[in-house]
Image: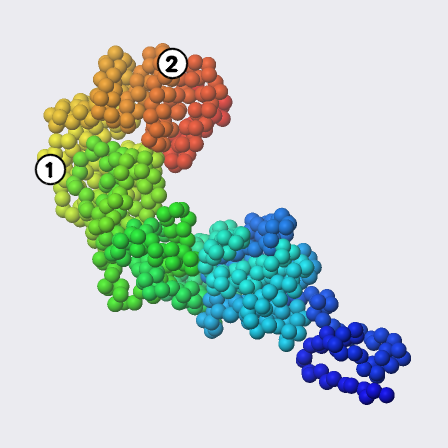
């Protein structure tokens, strides 16, 4: 009898197919045949089953957070991309990106647990540790090995070659409907080997960085924004009782505002409050108001619950130039900025600043929300300010801020002159070298620039005053005046004009004080505060007389006639309009002459002298047209429309108003549009065009309300409520 041959299988070593029945090169031994014949097939032993024969369902997801607030839309987007997407298009991959602490992992985990049934073959999870202060990013081959083991691949069967291991992994998941969750990815190279090859699997990747190369391969990008104020309060209410939140509503509102919708920050301050329930919320609000100590409130005692530490992991990934850019951004109190702004801060070409901003954008330390505009979260900016050491602050602060302020002062004045080139004032400061080409170069560009930079200009003006650079603050005030009038930003016009007057007084210049006082009087006129308007304009007239500035005196008289006209003192208004006309003619100022003629015409019309009124206004329209002064044409056409309406010619009135409205629309003068629409509604109602009249009246109401012109808006609302578009109601 042939001797029985036994083969010892090393522990942990997979069975070779040569040891199985039917292997051609190694026949079965006698004992094996005998036992098979005697006892039948051996019982199944899962320990010796090949990986391909096992039905394993890994469930590696970490415990889900108890809630995820304010992310309903993002939940739907994940479901659409990963569960309800088209089949046979390759694996579905969604990259969830955003700034540190915005809740990327929370969102993804909550969604993954909620959608677990959609992945019957299980879930694989790995923390790639892309932003971990305690470890370097995990190598993909390490993750691959863990995934293969979870799929019950025998350890010794995992190839040492990373490419071969990745191929085996793809084969192992090819026929499975699984979710693969790759958390905290550093870059795309870390992710590529972990992507399945078949369309049966779905992949979520979370990261603080942009990973465009994944998008090039078909991944969907979901950038997570901060929570809305309502969402932020809802999140706080999950940690704290409504009683605590409602005990001091202003303090709670201040805390929410300081957290800026960042879920990590909200959770950390909620923890502070919960630890000391007897402490008033106002104490925390006061702490958060202090820029120098604000970040202390966002520290729960370990790296994962310390906002500074979490942000530091992102900053540590930056190169030297980008890191310096990040720190210097803490100098400027700006919620948004451009490459030109950063170039002024750094004293470098805008192209270099743009490159550094791109590095910050990749790590989500800044967000590009328009092609040329960036934002930085307030808490991120506070951290940037802390990183700027005292020596670096002293070295850069004054010089850097001065360049920024000078650029905005120069740009505001340049844009203002494009909106209304007939203004006379002191020469503006020069823009910093290299930024001149970024100044607006035509009227549409000027309006767009003001629209984008309005809030920034308000902050820059305050900065200029705080730094005791009053001339720049005055230039910004002066530059904003026309734009704020056109847009109907009347309350903002008063505020910036008040700062402008304080700045002018600080310069000691009589000319600047006269101009600023007159501008403030005009701003009060626009908000209907006629008592203050009259007072400031008389002061301005006295200052202009002392300064010996003929055009300034004419301007003051012209502005006073408007106040007296609104007060119903038409004789006084006509007297100031006549004085303005004489001074403008003396100064050979044709545009001023046209404006004062139109003003005279309006006062004559108010006093029922319609022939004189029409004569003045027609001459004014001729001068404005000859000098291509569109805003003057709008005002004069409106006056001619009023004259036509008062003399029983509604068709001519409607024509005049429509022409004026078309011009006002052309250069987006919202302030004038509101009044002209209301006037047009009256003319259309007289003509029997009721629907068109109601439409014009609705538009007038929207414009008045949008400009916070409450008295006018209420007047029009009452007319709409009575369903009578004409002015007889």
Q: Quadrant of the N terminus?
A: bottom right
Which residue does the numbered mark 1 point to in the structure image?
A: 547
What scheme was used to colour the molecule? Answer: rainbow
Which residue does the numbered mark 2 point to in the structure image?
A: 650
Residue at position x 40%, y 65% in the image: 317
Residue at position x 14%, y 40% in the image: 511
Q: Is residue 322 left or right of residue 72?
A: left
Q: Does residue 99 lie above or below 630 as drawn?
A: below
SS label for mark 2: helix
Residue 453, position in %: x, y?
A: 33, 44
Q: Earlier in the sequence, mark 1 or mark 2?
A: 1
Q: Quadrant of residue 259?
A: bottom left
Q: Does residue 356 lie above or below 446 as drawn?
A: below
Residue 225, position in %: x, y?
A: 48, 53
Q: Does residue 163 lie above or below 6 as drawn?
A: above
Please tell me which residue lies in front, 53 or 36.
36
SS label for mark 1: helix
Q: Give the total of numbered labels.
A: 2
Residue 380, position in %: x, y?
A: 40, 60
Q: Nearer the viewer, mark 1 or mark 2?
A: 2
Q: Is residue 208 left or right of residue 675?
A: right
Residue 232 in view in this figure: no
Q: Is residue 368 left or right of residue 590?
A: right
């Amino acid at each position: 009898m042939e001797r029985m041959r036994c083969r010892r299988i090393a522990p942990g070593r997979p069975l070779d197919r040569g040891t199985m029945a039917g292997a051609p090169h190694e026949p079965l031994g006698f004992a094996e045949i005998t036992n098979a014949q005697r006892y039948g097939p051996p019982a199944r032993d899962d320990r010796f089953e090949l990986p391909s024969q096992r039905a394993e369902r890994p469930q590696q997801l970490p415990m889900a957070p108890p809630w995820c607030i304010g992310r309903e839309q993002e939940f739907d987007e994940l479901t659409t991309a990963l569960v309800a997407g088209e089949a046979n298009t390759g694996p579905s991959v969604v990259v969830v990106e955003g700034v540190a602490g915005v809740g990327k992992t929370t969102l993804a985990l909550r969604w993954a647990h909620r959608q677990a049934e959609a992945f019957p073959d299980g879930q694989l999870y790995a923390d790639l540790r892309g932003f971990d202060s305690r470890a370097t990013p995990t190598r993909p081959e390490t993750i691959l090995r863990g995934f293969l083991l979870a799929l019950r691949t025998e350890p010794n069967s995992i190839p040492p070659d990373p490419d071969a291991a990745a191929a085996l992994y793809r084969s192992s998941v090819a026929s499975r409907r699984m979710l693969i969750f790759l958390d905290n990815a550093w870059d795309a190279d870390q992710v590529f080997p972990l992507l399945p090859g078949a369309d049966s699997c779905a992949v979520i990747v979370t990261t603080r960085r942009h990973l465009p190369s994944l998008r090039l391969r078909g991944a969907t990008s979901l950038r997570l924004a901060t929570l809305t104020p309502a969402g932020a309060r809802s999140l706080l209410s999950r940690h704290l009782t409504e009683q605590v939140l409602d005990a001091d509503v202003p303090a709670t509102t201040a805390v929410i505002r300081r957290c800026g919708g960042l879920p990590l920050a909200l959770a950390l301050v909620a923890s502070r409050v919960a630890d000391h329930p007897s402490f008033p919320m106002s104490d925390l609000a006061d702490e958060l108001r202090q820029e120098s100590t604000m970040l202390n409130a966002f520290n729960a005692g370990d790296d994962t619950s310390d906002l500074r530490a979490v942000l530091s992991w992102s900053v540590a990934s930056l190169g030297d130039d980008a890191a310096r850019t990040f720190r210097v951004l803490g100098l400027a109190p700006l919620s948004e900025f451009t490459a030109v702004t950063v170039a002024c801060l750094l004293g470098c070409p805008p192209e270099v600043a743009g490159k550094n901003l791109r590095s910050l954008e990749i790590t989500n330390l800044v967000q590009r929300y328009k092609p040329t505009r960036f934002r930085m979260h307030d808490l991120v900016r506070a951290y940037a300010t802390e990183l700027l050491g005292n020596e670096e602050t002293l070295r850069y602060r004054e010089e850097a801020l001065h360049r920024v302020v000078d650029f905005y002062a120069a740009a505001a004045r340049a844009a203002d002159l494009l909106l209304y080139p007939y203004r006379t004032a002191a020469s503006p400061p020069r823009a910093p070298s290299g930024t001149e080409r970024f100044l607006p170069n035509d009227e549409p560009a000027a309006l767009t620039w003001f629209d984008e930079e309005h809030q920034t200009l308000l902050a820059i003006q305050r900065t200029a005053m705080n730094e005791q650079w009053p001339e720049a603050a005055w230039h910004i005030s002066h530059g904003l005046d026309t734009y704020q009038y056109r847009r109907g930003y009347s309350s903002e016009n008063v505020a910036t004009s008040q700062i402008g007057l304080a700045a002018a007084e600080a310069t000691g210049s009589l000319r600047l004080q006269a101009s600023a006082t007159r501008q403030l009087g005009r701003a009060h006129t626009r908000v209907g505060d006629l008592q203050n308007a009259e007072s400031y304009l008389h002061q301005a007239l006295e200052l202009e007389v002392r300064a010996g500035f003929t055009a300034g005196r004419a301007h003051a008289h012209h502005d006073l006639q408007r106040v007296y006209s609104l007060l119903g003192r038409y004789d006084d208004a006509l007297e100031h309009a006549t004085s303005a006309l004489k001074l403008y003619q003396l100064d050979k100022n044709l545009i001023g002459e046209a404006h004062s003629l139109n003003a005279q015409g309006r006062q004559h019309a108010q006093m029922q002298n319609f022939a004189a009124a029409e004569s003045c206004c027609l001459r004014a329209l001729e001068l404005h047209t000859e000098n291509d002064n569109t805003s003057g044409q709008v005002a004069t056409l409106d006056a001619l429309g009023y004259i036509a309406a008062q003399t029983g010619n509604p068709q001519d009135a409607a024509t005049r108003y429509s022409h004026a409205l078309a011009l006002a629309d052309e250069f987006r003068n919202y302030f004038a549009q509101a009044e002209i629409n209301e006037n047009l509604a009256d003319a259309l109602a007289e003509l029997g065009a009721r629907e068109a009249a109601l439409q014009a009246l609705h538009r007038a109401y929207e414009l008045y309300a949008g400009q916070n012109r409450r008295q006018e808006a209420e007047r029009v609302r009452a007319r709409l409520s009575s369903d009578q578009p004409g002015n007889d109601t």
